[in-house]
Structure formats: structure tokens, C-alpha cells
Amino acid sequence: MSRELRRAGYSVFFMKTHRHINAGCHGRSSAIHACKGGSRTFPTCCRLVVRQDIIEIHTRLLYPPPWADAVGGSFQLTRPRHFPIIFQTENTMVRERKIMKYRDFGNTGIKVSALGFGAMRLPKVGDGEKDPVDMEKSVPMIQKGLDLGINYIDSAWRYLNQTCDKVVGQAISGRDRGQLYLSTKNPIDTDDVKEWRGRLDIQLKDMQTDYIDFYHIHGLQWNQYKNKAVPEGYMDELKKARDEGLIRHISFSCHDNPANIYKLVDTGEFSSMLVQYNLLHRHNDAVIAHAREKGMGISIMGPVGGGRIAFMSRLKPGEDRGLPGLSLRFVLSNPNISVALSGMNTMEMIDENTATAENDGPLSDTESRDIKTMLDQIKDLEDLYCTGCGYCMPCEQGVDIPSNFLLYNYATIYEFGPGIMANYEQGLGRRDATADFCNECGDCVEKCPQDIPIPERMKDVARHFDEMKNKAASS
């Protein structure tokens, strides 16, 4: 019976009571032993035993169900909300299998899972930056995500000390390649375009595939595109690789300011883009909508806040809701987003995020209220609340006002480390766009919908980064 039900798309759970269970222990967490071992959290008042040879666990409950009282080592099941029972005997219950949601990836004709597997944060064999990925732990994690309906995997040349593409290749080995979509990246960090193009061949070998679906220029900025990617032949190499069938779509990932992302989108050269968007970083909202109107697929990095998790932990969603799940729901509720990438590195995280992604509808009233509360908290915590809309731009002196404010908040509120100083000096400094180039003309003030006294705040930004620089030099 169980095998026939599995073929029909249901999950089967074999349950066994234990005599130590007391009456009235509704909603208690107990262990559930799955196909490949390990434990999962399951909100019930009894112990569940899953037989390895015939059971598959596809999802977990989102809410504790109203189980009947367990009395004297026996129990009864009611038909709980969110958990329809379609077949039941004394020891067996079958419930409907929940299904991963899929979305159009721009005009590519491809449907991708709402949740993508970001392979950047998979376990490593050690704690050092140069340590490789732990294949033994990581391969089963990716495979579990695929079994739960994820069909989009994101990797990169640099990730995990250049072992990320390899672990993805091992994880997808033997699977139907036509049902999976691979994304990887290659940064323009060399002046030898042939060397840069040669990395693609290595990545194809590492990923054990004949083609890559979405090949990104990693960390592309507008100036780099305009002054290097196009005139020095990098874009031509990508187009040749596409014509040869080695890549299907040309894409970019980007941390540039929204105004420059607009320019990259409007070149018409890219099928998709990977940008940041989350509760703390909503600056790209408008350019995401613009790119979607242009027919591009939109993938999102850092949907739960990434390195700012320490800051995020200061936010208090209502009703004891999980912050990561609510943050992911916020991102997925944006209809312009195709796929949200989550850097998952535990089996529990994969379970939780796939369960969240199965609900990609509009935010509920409770979720909307909780998110509004969190956004208000963010605004109160930020000394300088710039939305990054870009209405103040362009600046006649070349100052990148939104990026200066963003880096200032990263440094003072989100407590980012020395990397922010590098972004300020190298990212903005190389194009004379830092705050100290402000001449206090005041043209930007009238344009700012947040009524920020921009020239005064530019002095604060310049002063803060000068102090950071002097402190670093003296230490």
C-alpha cells in the first residue's frame, strides 16, 4: 500500500506510541527518524518511527496540529487543519504531499523553484578561508534540497576555495539534467580574457555537465562593464560560448548602486541578474521591477540579511514567529522576484526554508503587521534612514550619495568590519565618489523625499571613514 501511495505523490508516516507519554501533551516536539538517518522536529505528542526502506519525508508541519490526548500509551488522531489525513489505520497515517512552488524566470521560458540552493555556505572541512568544501556533508544537503523540489542551484568560481562547483557536480550526478538549472559565476579579475574564458571549461568539468544554464559575470559594476567587459572582449567570449551551447544565458551578479544596475539592465545583453534584496536592503526594489518589465529573470542573494544577522536578531517579530522564515516570506511576496537563494548548511535549515517556500502567496495580515513592525524598528535603529531611491542623483561633483549612506549605515549600525572601509576606499574612492568630494552645493537636498540634510550628513560620513582609516593605521 505505501509504495502505491508514494507513487501517487503522498508521504507515509508510520507511528508508534510510547507508554511514557502523558495525557494532554499537545504540540510537544519529538524525534522523527528519516530515510537517511538524523533527526527532524515534528510537532506531535508521540514518538514517530519511520522505516528506512519505504518512507520518504517531503515536508514538515508548519503549525502544531490539535492532536487528541494521549492516554495510557495509546492515542487517536483528529483531522487537523493544514494537515489533511486521507488514509488512516491504527499505526499509519498518510497526508497530502506539499509541493514546491515554481515561477517564471523572466522570458527564458524556464520555471524555477521559488527557493534556490545557494551553495556558498556549505560546510567546509575546517574553519579557514582556504579550506575546501566538506563533500561528505555537503553533497547530501544539496540532494535533499533537490528531493524537496529545488531545481535552481547557485555556485561560483571563487566559492569555498574554488571547490563549490565540484560539490554541485557531485550532487547532481546521475540526475535528470533537463530538470535542473545551474547558475555559476566568473569574476573579471584578470586582464587575460583567454584565461578568463578558460575558467568556463574548468567549471563545466567540475560541475560534470555539458552546459551551464545561467553564467554570471560575478560582481559586475557599470564602469567595469563599460570600460572592460565590452571593449576588451569579455562579453564577446560569453556570446561565443552561448553560440557554442556551453552556456544557455548570459547573466550578471551585482552590488553596484541601483542607478548603475538600471544601466546594466538597459543594455539588453543579459537574461537575468542576481542582486541583494531583504528587509534591511530594499534599495533595489525599483530596479528589480524594472528588470522584470524588461523580461529578465530575477534571483535574490541574502534574503535573510546575510552577514547582518547580528543586527537582525535585534528585531522582534510578533507572535513568536521565526525571523528567518518571515524574512524569506517578505522576499518571496514580491511578485517581481523569480527565485530567492538561501545559503543552507544544515538539514534543518533546508527543511525550514522549503516549508516556507511552499507558501508563496501574498503576505497574511499577521505577516504584514509583523513586517511593518520590523521595518519601523529598522528605521528607528538607523541613525540615517536613506532608502537608496537615487532621486538625489546625479551629483555634479560625482559623489555617489546613496552608496555613501549605505556604507555608513553598514559601518555604524550593522557593525560590519574592515571590509566596509575597503568598499569605501576602493569601490567609491577609485571613481572619486566618496563623501569628502561634496562641495555642499545643496542641489540634492530639494530632491530628497526623506528630507535628509545631505551635505551635513556627507560631512558625518567623511569624518567617520577618516576616523576608521586613522584607527586602522595606528593599530
Image (tube, rainbow, N blue to C red):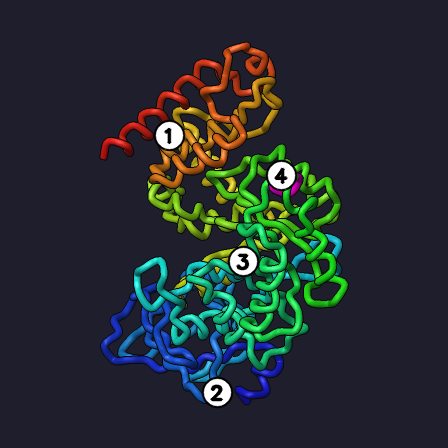
Nearer to us of marks 3 and 1 is 1
Nearer to us of marks 3 and 4 is 4
Q: Distance between the residues labelled 2 and 3?
A: 26 Å
Q: Report helix, strand or loop for mark 1.
A: helix
Q: What stretch is highlighted in magenta?
A: 222-226
Does 225 appear in magenta? yes
Q: Where is residue 98 in the image (x, y as percent from the top left)?
A: 56, 67
Q: Distance between the residues labelled 4 and 1?
A: 31 Å
Q: Is residue 371 left or right of residue 417?
A: right
Q: Which of 410 and 432 is in front in this view?
A: 432
Q: Nearer the viewer, residue 38 or 134?
A: 134
Residue type at mark 2? Ile
Residue under label 3, please give it.
357
Estimate how packed mark 1 is, as few (under 14), some (14 to 19) or many (20 or more) residues with alpha carbons within 10 Å: some
Contact (CB < 8 A) between labels 3 and 1? no
Q: Position of residue 75 (x, y in %)?
A: 36, 76
Residue 363 visible somewhere in the drawing: no
Residue type at mark 4? Trp
Residue under label 4, please give it.
222
Q: Identify the residue shown where x is 55% and y is 35%.
A: 283
User: Which secondary structure class fits the magenta region best?
Assistant: helix
Q: Is residue 59 left or right of residue 335?
A: left
In this view, 11 is above or below 463? below
Residue type at mark 1? Leu
Residue under label 2, please give it.
54
Q: Where is residue 301 in the image (x, y as percent from the top left)?
A: 52, 50
Image quadrant of residue 104? bottom right
Residue 381, numbered circle: 1
N-terminal label among 4 and 1: 4
N-terminal label among 3 and 1: 3
